[in-house]
Image (cartoon, rainbow, N blue to C red):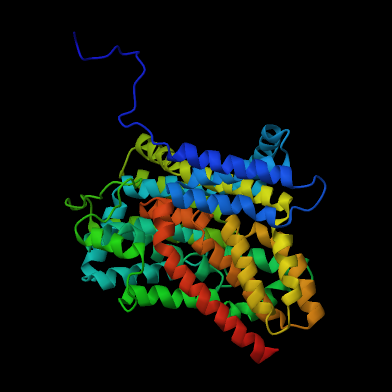
Amino acid sequence: MSNTSHPFAPSLPGKRGSRRPVLLSAGILAVVISLTLYHSPGTNYGWISLVPSALVLIVAIATHRTLEALAVGALAGLILLQPDDYIGELADISLAVMMDETIAWLILVCGLMGGFIAMLEKSGCTLSFSHFMTRLVKTRRQSLLSTAVLGVLIFIDDYLNALATSAAMKRLTDRFGVSREKLAYIVDSTAAPICILVPLSTWAVYFAELLETNGASEGPGMWLYIQSIPFMLYGWVAMALVMLVALGKMPDLGPMKAAEERARAGQPIPDGAPDQPLSDDELPKSNPWLGVFNFLAPMAVLIGASAYFEIDLLKGVIVATLFTLALYLLQRLATFNTLMDAIMDGFRTMMLPLAIVAVGFVLREINDQLGMTEFMIDSLSPYLTVALLPAIVFVSMAVVVFATGSSWGVFVISIPIVVPIAQHMGAPMPLVVGALLSASSFGSHACFFSDSSVLSSQGSGCLPMQHGLTQFPYALLGALVTAIGFVILGYVMA
């Protein structure tokens, strides 16, 4: 009898599943049902509002799966909100999220960015840039430093930074035995933490408008934002830490140590990562200097067009994609079909990051309905003094942003609450705004399912949890130093 099965026969998994996921699911379901029975309908959820985010962290650490952990947390929150019709509530919230202008913008920007970078790689221009950089960079330390410097230079938007810097540098860092996790850490550390320090970034435009709308300043919101830049301590601390890591002055902490040992042994890409080793044995077929131009010119157009359209990355990436298509077709670097296939492949590579961010938005909406942000602020209000206000604002909002992964959405709720409190207490507004932006930056940096962290891991070629676990010790150290700094500044400036 032949061992070959019928072509239409159902296939069996090569490895049978374990009971651990079943036991974990049963435990979570029991907790959620118990809380549903404990909570009185029509009353505030209080500490129960923290449960969905806590479940996300527990499941993510237990399974190392990001999307599944977010889905579990979201479902748990929906059962708490609507135990009788959580499926209908899930459909309503999911539809509302997918119709949200921010999500639509995110899908278009990330998809087009993925296609844009895929064109650079398919045409061989990324390889040309890599060979050019090898003439300048001769050591491992130089490869890390050049990555950090490039990340600082691309300050206009954290999405652009996360995808462009990693695409430009991962071939070079692979050559010097740098783990993709460390590359992702450097890229992510020069994304949101740096963007908040520059008033010509998407972050500055967004938060300045938010501050002005909520009456935080009598004058323009951008002027208050600029006054607050020296007090955005987490951005400064994160930049100092990443430079120390690049210079080799900061030791590898926790999981990063194991990742670096694996990379030095010849495996820079971790197991299970969504990337393949990059071969650069063949020299570019075209003039190497022309190849460098063909890599840098589209990047320059992307940054310039985004700035021209008032820091609008969507318009910038549309202009850059059209420019790159025309540039490469005129030089016959690739056929039209090849470039269009590259754009579609780039869209496909962004599906997992986009799914994670979309489910993260669903979780944020559920947390808003549970009243998580208000509960955190109300719980800490009795301990507020003028001196401790900046530190408490930083710590509480950092926890909320880390738990929700929403570095922008949370502050639509929190700024209208925090600003009147600060004004009533007579606290220095630039210091309080610096604490808010520091919390937003930390949450975006440390949370393994925030948009910039997911894109940094995707661009660098590792999974979000691989990036999140190796980066977290550095982010936590930065948060500790920042909190101490706000305590000191609070007492000095009170």
Q: Residue at point 69% right, 78% down?
A: 389
Residue 416's place in the image compared with 268, above or below, is below
Toward the top, the furthest residue is: 1
Q: Residue at point 31% right, 69% down?
A: 144
* The C terminus - image quarter: bottom right
Residue 69: in sight, yes or no?
Answer: yes
Residue 471's place in the image compared with 218, above or below, is above
- Residue 114 screen position, x and y as percent: 44, 47
Query: How many labels were placed on the picture?
Result: 0
* The N terminus - image quarter: top left
Q: In front here: 405 or 455?
A: 405
Residue 296: in sight, yes or no?
Answer: no
Q: In front here: 151 or 367?
A: 367
- Residue 41 screen position, x and y as percent: 80, 44
- Residue 286 screen position, x and y as percent: 23, 51
- Residue 194 screen position, x and y as percent: 50, 70
Q: Residue at point 57% right, 60% down?
A: 402
Residue 389's place in the image compared with 154, above or below, is below
Q: In front here: 356 or 344?
A: 356
Q: Residue at point 73% right, 55% down?
A: 371
Horizontal arrangement in the rendering, residue 103 relative to residue 169 (left or right): right
